[in-house]
Amino acid sequence: MAAVVFLLPFYLIVRNGLATEAEITARDWRFFPDQPHWENFGELFGDPAVPILRSVLNSTVVAVLQTAGQLLLCSLAGYGLARIPYRHADKVFYAVLATLMIPAAVTFVPTFVVVSALGWVSDLRGLVIPGLFSGFTAFLFRQYFRTFPRELEEAARIDGLGHWGTYWRIVVPNSRGFFAALGVIAFMTSWNQFLWPLVIAQDQGSWTVQVALSVFLTAQSINVHELFLAAAVSITPLVVVFLVLQRFLVRGVVESGIKE
């Protein structure tokens, strides 16, 4: 029963995406249109007002780069905080934690001012670079690396590897499940961003898919069937990523070290 409830929005998206405006708003509800209107796909991808393919491509580029950046930078930060001893390690860690307590609305305007001054408005750099690091992801990596078997690292150091060699050749290969779990979360978070891309992507060429979806719903008109069909197209990559890597989500939470 719970599965049916959770699948209901997906059914509505597909059903309304393959229907006409009249069928969507009709008083008599049909489970599915008598004749699915596959031509809606041609109407959607041929709509000059909303470059949906370009928007999906932009979202893919932004999500992939931000995910890769977070996995690299945050894992390095987490490993350094967990395994490299130095006098101010705890202070740096607490500073990272402090960033999690600052509301996003507080840093939104200063970040926009910096991005605008660099000339990155309506540029993919303005969409990607501010999201390359996450304090929360660094925190999760730090907690995980604290539980990583020290014996493996000690064996690597006996073989002559330094901190970088141990991280890259021992720690990363043995932490693929955790990396995959955080990668899924980072990808979904980046893909679903709306407010920041709405402000930065000020021309059609830099729109992400979430911004493109908002164009179908304006104060002047509502293009219902294209909106639902575009929503179906936009969630397809998320569904594929989740189905392929879903087992890593549970495994990653178990191995995260939050229980400490």
Image (cartoon, helix red, strand yellow):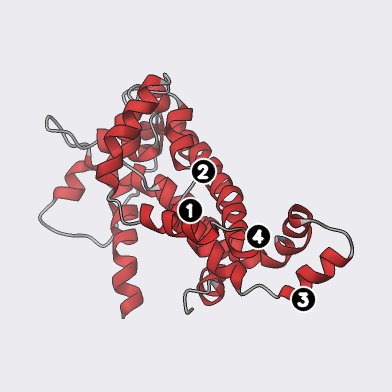
Q: Nearer the viewer, residue 89 or 19?
A: 89
Image spot of residue 5 (x, y percent): 29, 72
Q: CA distance from mark 3 to mark 2?
A: 32 Å
Quick check: marks 3 and 4 in contact, CB under 8 Å?
no
Q: CA distance from mark 2 to mark 1?
A: 8 Å
Q: CA distance from mark 3 to mark 1?
A: 30 Å
Q: CA distance from mark 3 to mark 4?
A: 15 Å
Q: CA distance from mark 4 to mark 1?
A: 25 Å
The answer to whether 102 is drawn above or below residue 40 in the figure is below
Residue type (three-letter) at the residue carrying disc 1: Ala
- What is the crowding at mark 1: few (fewer than 14 residues within 10 Å), some, or many (at least 20)? many
Quick check: marks 4 and 1 in contact, CB under 8 Å?
no
Task: Give the residue pinned by disc 4.
Answer: 84
Figure label count: 4
The quadrant where residue 2 appears: bottom left
Mark 2 lies on a secondary structure that is helix
The answer to whether 18 is drawn above or below residue 241 in the figure is above
The disc, 2 or 4, on the residue closer to the chain's N-terminal end is 2
Task: Give the residue pinned by disc 2.
Answer: 66
The disc, 2 or 1, on the residue closer to the chain's N-terminal end is 2
Q: Nearer the viewer, residue 251 or 94?
A: 94
Image spot of residue 198 (x, y percent): 30, 33
The answer to whether 114 is drawn above or below residue 19 in the figure is above
Mark 1 lies on a secondary structure that is helix
Quick check: marks 2 and 1 in contact, CB under 8 Å?
yes
Residue type (three-letter) at the residue carrying disc 2: Gln
Task: Give the residue pinned by disc 3.
Answer: 151
Q: Nearer the viewer, residue 65 or 26?
A: 65
